[in-house]
Amino acid sequence: MPLRMKTELSEKLFAKAKQSIPGGVNSPVRAFKSVGGTPPFIVRAKGAYVYDADGNEYLDYVGTWGPAILGHAAPEVLTDLHYAMKNGLSFGAPTPKEIDLAEKVKELVPSIDKVRFVNSGTEATMSAIRLARGYTKRDKIIKFDGCYHGHADYLLVKAGSGAETCGVPDSAGVPKSFTEHTLSARYNDLESVQAVLEANKNEVACVIVEPIIGNMGCIPPQEGFLQGLRKLCDEHKTLLIFDEVMTGFRVALGGAQELYGITPDLTCFGKIIGGGLPVGAYGGRADIMACVAPEGPVYQAGTLSGNPLAMAVGLKTLTMLSEGKGKVYKELERKGALLEEALQAALDRQKVTAQINRVGSMFSVFFADHPVNTADDARKANGETFNQLFHYYLERGVYVAPSAFEAGFISLKHSDEDLLRTTEVFEGFLEQILS
Ligand code: KE4
């Protein structure tokens, strides 16, 4: 396994970036704060690989945090993007492509009667919560410790992902009054949800949940948890919002709601729905969506919402994923299972205890001798060992998220050889920490 060639250029670029951009990055988790070291400045991506300014090649399990499910720069997607670009970049007016993508989303996700496109997952969750409050005329919301739903002020409460990684799950700059309506419960613990609902009877507008947590590492729902959430929300006339920004079109063509057979009242999308261009979306029941301006009184807007380039790329991505009626997801499951079995076999050979959590092509390895079913379980895993693995991987051309509180993603372009090579590097790390 050749060690990384050099990093001088990325180091120079990082120093230069820090002079103009806070922390040198446009999103905190990219800065390698928790793992240490210098982030490679990526200049090109193709298939399962990304390439940095120093010419190093990496097998990519970040996948631009989820969108690159087809592999980077899929030729078919680029063709549609080039065609769209020739007609202009943005019109600030309704366009036919928005209808095509909206109809595709409705076809793939039956719980969606109507959908509104925005520009990020944060906008999607922000807007869905405002809509839930407007529809129910209630103010309080319930989120889960460790779930991350973007950086809206009132959602930065016990938030996962970069907030957890940077140690600011309750960010500075958010007035206490902004979070007084944000209640927190524990994921995979229905009793904690019931207690909060009972203590705030008829005051909770919505429960928002990552149906599979991806922002504390990958934590799947335990049997009955999501069904229990659905039942509790019905009993309390509280809306159930699935934040499928990460799981949407990732774990199944219809997302986690298809996988687990749950119908949420509203769903938020991001990442894959834009195929790598900035698209977020929220949608759901017609009677709720009828409250969204200009039809109804809940205001939400955006200059670049429905951008024709992003619509073209998102539509091509979902169209390619839906070819062969779920064939793609059988292949992603096969790849995921192959990697999981190979990693587990390496752990067994080296007699190292770790937890591999996986749903389809999203996964995490926790260095823990206990199951990881909650945010606290994830926090108790050995972060130092993760950080060592991170750098061992990076030096050998395997690029995983620079935080133990993120999920890894396999794309359709990760070959079996790529996955097995990953395991060889992983086993080399295990041997090293044992020596
Ligand atoms: P964006 O605003 O970053 O598009 O989406 C926010 C968001 C909402 N909901 C879920 C479940 C999410 O995972 C995210 C964003 N995910 C993180 C990675 N875990 C984005 C990466 C980053 O913050 O740089």
Image (cartoon, helix red, strand yellow):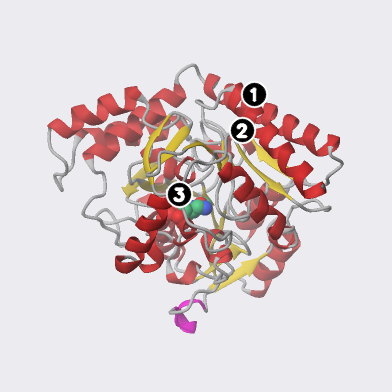
Q: Position of residue 348 (x, y in %)?
A: 84, 36
> Which tag, 3 or 2, sits closer to the chain's start?
2
**Farthest top residue in view:** 324
Q: Position of residue 367 (x, y in %)?
A: 75, 51
- Residue 223 seen anywhere in this rendered image of the structure: no
Give the residue type at disc 2: Met
- Marks 3/2: CA distance? 17 Å
Q: Does the stretch in magenta take in 286?
A: no
Asked if 79 appears above or below 266 in the picture, the reply is above
Give the residue type at disc 1: Arg
Which residue does the image show at 37% across and 63% down from the upper left? 15
Please report the bounds of the magenta region as a residue range: 174-179
For the residues labelled 2 and 1, say whether their Cβ atoms are less than 8 Å apart. Answer: no
Asked if 157 appears above or below 44 in the picture, the reply is below
**Farthest right residue in view:** 351
Toward which corner of the image does residue 35 lie, by quadrant?
A: bottom right
Side of 172 relative to 315 (left or right): right
> Which tag, 1 or 3, sits closer to the chain's start?
3
Residue named by callout 1: 334
Q: Mark number for residue 269?
A: none
> Which tag, 2 or 1, sits closer to the chain's start?
2
Q: Residues within 10 Å of mark 1 (few under 14, many from 20)?
A: some
Mark 3, secondary structure of its residue: loop
For the residues labelled 3 and 2, say whether their Cβ atoms are less than 8 Å apart. Answer: no
User: Quadrant location of the N terminus?
Assistant: top right
Side of 158 relative to 116 (left or right): right
Residue named by callout 2: 1
Give the residue type at disc 3: Thr
Residue named by callout 3: 7
